[in-house]
Image: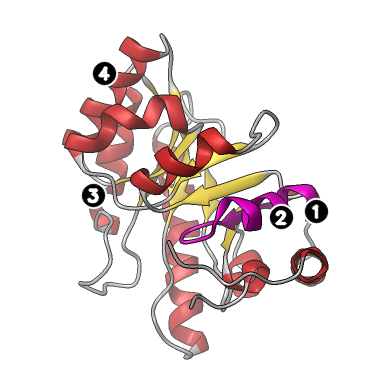
Amino acid sequence: MTDTRPPKNSISENLKRVCERMSRAADTAHRLPSEITLIGVTKFKSVPVIEMALDAGLTNIGENRLQEAREKFPLLDLTHVKRHFIGHLQTNKVKWVPALFDVVQSIDSEKVATALSRECLEQIGGAIQVFIQVNTSGEPSKFGVEPATAGDLVGYCLEQKGLEIQGLMTIGPNTNELPRIQKSFMLLRNLAEQIQSSYRADIPRLDLSMGMTDDFEWAIAEGATHVRIGRAIFGERD
């Protein structure tokens, strides 16, 4: 497992700067900073490095890889930390999810939704919070359902007793072109509004998980309720 090992005060300062940037972005968008949840992405980061961030006040972490979570989580005190799975989820791996995570942000098929619901009911006797991952950039390298079918998948998940719909998630386009980034995030926001209108009785609100190190301020401007930040907190990968 590779990671950079910045000094503890470096991670603390990085976290502080990210929170300040989030606050400024929220102010600019006439929003409350408290409306936005910061998820620290711990992919490829070691237990000591993650502990530094938790000691500095990070309360939500996101992992992309189930195997990493299985190795690292038992070694961490996560009593008051919300754990998000943010990577691509394969049906044959869902059995590990209920014991490790509080939220799954990457539901992209009925098959995965069915398997996860079943495992949650069997293992924890209840539902896990989920986001539907939507490919709003149109890039073939990215996972997620097409925007046109996102509402159908939301409806399907509402029928699964082991799932609790929390919102929609997307990964912005791999570009520095602001119009493309804005378009991707606006699409998710508009899609959430349309889906809420269709399922108003079942979904009082849909959160929006969008925005990473390079584009989270633009995501906040477009309504993000969750941002997923790795590099700006932990530094570059080796």
Considering only vertical position in the picture, is 20 above or below 144? below
Residue 156 visible in this rendered orientation of the protein:
no
Q: Secondary structure at mark 3?
A: helix
> Disc 1 marks which residue?
56
Quadrant of res 91: top left
In the image, farthest residue toward the bottom:
177
Q: Give the secondary structure at mark 4.
A: helix
Quadrant, the N terminus: bottom left
Separation of marks 2 and 1 at Cα, in angstroms: 5 Å
Indicate the secondary structure of the residue bearing disc 1: loop
The segment highlighted magenta reads 37-56
- Image location of residue 145, percent across then percent down: 25, 54
Q: Is residue 23 left or right of residue 6?
A: right
**Image mark for residue 149:** 3
At label 2, the amino acid type is Ala
Mark 1: which amino acid? Ala
User: Where is residue 205 shown, x and y percent of the image?
Assistant: 56, 37
How crowded pointer 2 is (Cα within 10 Å; few <14, some 14-19, many 20+) is rated as many
- Crowding near pointer 1: few (<14 within 10 Å), some, many (20+)? some
Query: Mark 4 or mark 1, which has the lower sequence index?
Result: 1
**Circle on res. 118:** 4
**Residue drawn at the location 35% of the way across and 25% of the way down:** 158
For marks 2 and 3, give the CA distance: 37 Å
Work out how far the residue at label 3 is from the one at label 1, CA to CA, in angstroms. Answer: 40 Å
Residue at 35 percent across and 51 percent down: it is 133
Element at badge 2? helix
- What numbered label is drawn on residue 146? none
The amino acid marked with disc number 3 is Thr
The mark that comes first in sequence, 4 or 3, is 4
Q: Give amino acid for label 4.
A: Arg
